Image (spheres, rainbow, N blue to C red):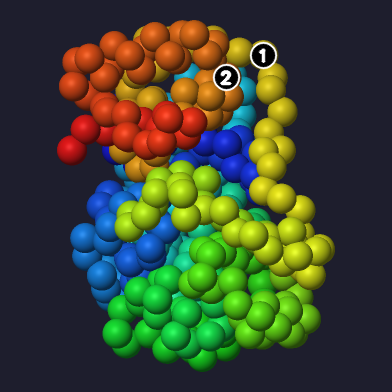
Amino acid sequence: MYKHIFGPVLSSRLGSSLGVDLLGDNICSFDCLYCESGKTEIKTLRRSPLADSAVILKELREWLKRCARRPEHITLGGPGEPCLNSRMGEIISSIKDSWPEIPLAVLTNSSLLDDDQLRNELMGADVVLPSLDSMVQGEFKQINRPHPEIKLESIVQGLLDFRSMFRGKIFLEVLLLPGVNDSVENLTLLKDFQLEMRPDRVDIAIMTRPGAYMDLSRGAVPGIENWRRQFCSSPCRTIFKHGPARDFKPGLDDEIMSTVRRRPQTPQQLAAALGADLKEITDLLSRMENSGKIQALAGKQDSPKFYISRG
């Protein structure tokens, strides 16, 4: 099983996305209510060398050699804030030098974009996907539960400064929780902000996987379509198109483990992302569950079944 590489996973914005974990643990500057990676174990603003670019390159080379179908993006992420890895610039340069034909994306919660050095490190990426869930101070603290030294106004200014210098694409995401950040005040402030920032797209999202502090029953937002109309945002539908099934070598269970360790997945999501037969995936999940490697999350009777690693 790879230490840093997982997926590919299906992304509504990036298609088939091969994940690169730059953290190795739940390390973040936030502890969001909805986080699909679970509760933050280490909340910090201190950047440190959390992953070695040489190891990442070795694993990427092995994965890409093994799989005939290239991912639509290589995406730097992890179970927290990937920009906390102080080797971000080195990792971006190494990946782009080795595979310039594959677009490189970076996920971020935007909390470190007020750092000049980080903004410069991100210049080598093709796509950056920052989030900004609320511009209302009370809502921001409630939904994102930030490190106490983080200031909302610094995040906003950091996003504006980054937009002014970045020539790639920026996909801004706002995740809505009913009764938390779906207020008219937040909608108005974010609309004005997008006119100033000019992201390439704005995605208004809701929970699609169980979160750290809540289940999917909190995901529905009554006014979601109005928000999407206001931002000319389409629903987050999967844009990945199925190609021929991958010619797998032994180790499909390792690829599944690498993915469910980092985020809950349904059998359908795994089958589509890995290009595998749904029955094959379902049978393998059943065997892995029986052996104690993974577990199914309990939910309502009509809810999709999500799998996570045990423990």
Q: Which image quadrant: the C terminus?
A: top left
Mark 2 or mark 1, earlier in chain? 1
The CA distance from mark 2 to mark 1 is 7 Å
Front position in the image: 248 or 290:
290
x then y, percent, for residue 271: 53, 21
- Look at mark 2 in the image and give the residue it sits on: 275
Front position in the image: 96 or 281:
281
**CA neighbours of label 2 inside 10 A, class few (<14), some (14 to 19), many (20+):** some
x then y, percent, for residue 164: 69, 81
Looking at the rendered structure, the number of numbered marks drawn on it comes to: 2
Would residue 90 be found to the left or right of residue 275 on screen?
left
Image quarter for residue 163?
A: bottom right
Q: Which image quadrant: the N terminus?
A: top left
- Look at mark 1 in the image and give the residue it sits on: 244
From where the camera sits, is residue 176 visible?
yes
Disc 2 to disc 1: CB gap under 8 Å? yes
Would residue 84 be found to the left or right of residue 120 on screen?
left
In the picture shown, does residue 251 fall above or below 298? above
Q: Indicate the amino acid at tag 1.
A: Pro
Please give the label number shown on residue 71.
none
For image coordinates 51% across by 70% down, the residue present is 179
Image quarter for residue 50?
A: bottom left
